[in-house]
Amino acid sequence: MRILALGWQLEGPGVERAELFSAESLASYDAVLLDPKGIPRLWEGQARLEGDGAWRLYPGQDLGLSRALERLFSLRREELSDLLQRGGGLLVVRVRPEGSAVEIAGHPPRRITPYSLLPRLSLVADPHHLSLPQGLRFVPRRGRDISWLEPAHPLAPYLEAFLSAGYEAVLVSSLGAPLSAFGRVLAKNRVGDALAWDLPVGTGRILFLPSFPGADPRRAGEILIPALAELLERPLPEGGPDWLSNYPLPGEEELLSKREELEVRRRELKKEEEKLARELGRISGLRGLLYPRGLVGLRAAVELALEELGCRVAKEGDRFLSARAGKRELLLRPALSPSGPVGPEPYRELLLALDRLKNEEGREAHGVLVAVAEPRLDPKRRGPQWAEAVRRGCAEHGITLVSGYQLFRGVVAAREGDRAEEVLEALFETEGEWRWKP
């Protein structure tokens, strides 16, 4: 297998490196690896930066550079077209931002970009149409959020191995046609942008892959080259004429049926996995009583804890929670202090809120102050969770005072031994500090 790397630092058996202007015919290779990042060096230093922000070459004033560029790109583009259409080879393109382009002055002016090397193709997948390369955009967008990979593709191990290296651009069709209509999207980010794309062209294919900046050339070669070999060894091209389906083989129907069954099971497993993930997220969210994501996170964890105890929970403004169990009601005020004990301000707010509910709305509620202080420390090593004045005030006014750690212990006991009613009763009946007693 002969592989040509143009500007792509890749190491492995059969890999040759060359410059675009000096390489042998691109059609003579099995696979061509193209990194467009270095292509602008062909005209950098010679083109003029005009007032409209465009780089331009003027034929007759550039010592023949514009004519040489047009001939070089035309020749290499034809060679790549032959590689794909007639040779059944692979063109592997690193997806990077388009970078600087050059305009050759004339009537009309001609524009050359690093992606002008791509063969000129007109793809149709009713009702969609896509022209290459002008119909494909390489939008600058950096990230590491590669959240979906096509698992049943030879390139999946390569994509999975360099997830942490991230991407620099995404693929978008200029007319809005879905790329999946013309080829297989192999990777997406969390918002659904295409990051890798397998596009059948004739008997060959173009593979657009994330740039993976900083990837080790040797390790990349060890994973990528076997994947390319597997694609080249397939006897059938990715697309074929319609009449091929008129020639079934014994056992093919059974295999197709099994594949459909596996697809159904995969969807069912995905639903179960999503359900399990939600339940795990809910349970792990209870640890927010120990180490919350700010006051908002503490309130969310207290809400989860009350739901575990069988309460119907509703938000009361920005700082309070209302929990109902039968005809009884709790009004809870979560309080968080990053350093030092929780002070009297949350206690005063809770006291005023209880008075307002009673006098203005006629609702009798039992107050609960949930305090978490010094969350960076292990709960067993933390100092006092509230000031002495808070403890005295809660005892005098019949408010339950509980630390996040003690509430967590109560919820754990409720889940382990079906003691939710016991824990909830203690929250209703306690006046002052409450600790879980097994």
Image (spheres, helix red, strand yellow):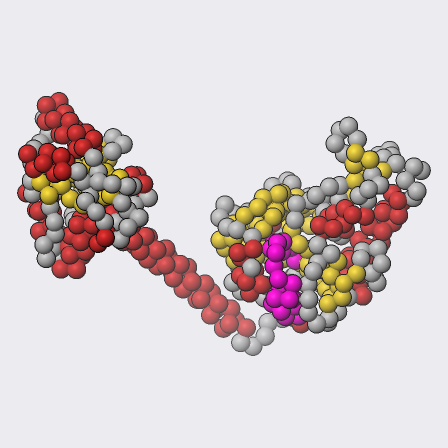
Residue 115, above or below 267 = above
Q: Quadrant of the rendered structure where residue 94 is?
A: bottom right
Say whether residue 329 is left or right of residue 209.
left
> From the image, which quarter does the C terminus lie in?
bottom left
Q: Quadrant of residue 7?
A: bottom right
Was residue 218 drawn as part of the magenta stretch in this picture?
A: yes
> Residue farthest to the bottom?
250
Of residues 65 and 265, the one nearer the viewer is 65
Q: Position of residue 279 (x, y in %)?
A: 30, 54
In this view of the protein, which residue sits in the foreground, 117 or 342?
A: 342
Question: Image height check: is 305 above or below 91?
Answer: above
Residue name at image x 15 percent, y 55 percent: 414
Q: Determine if the magenta segment contains residue 66.
A: no
Q: How many marks?
A: 0
Residue 213 or residue 314, whichever sits in front: 213
- Range of magenta residues: 207-229
Left or right: 385 in relation to 35: left
List the single residue furthest toward the top: 360
Residue appearing at x 23%, y 49% in the figure: 382
Identify whether 430 is placed above or below 280: above
Is residue 244 shown left or right of residue 113? left
Q: Residue at x 70, y 58 (%)?
A: 8
Q: Percent from the top left, x then y, of residue 317?
A: 25, 30
In x, y percent, where is residue 421?
Answer: 10, 50
Query: At which x and y percent is residue 336?
Result: 26, 39
Q: State the residue at coordinates (70%, 72%).
A: 13
Q: Is residue 135 visible?
A: yes
Res. 206 visible in picture: no
Quadrant showing the N terminus: bottom right
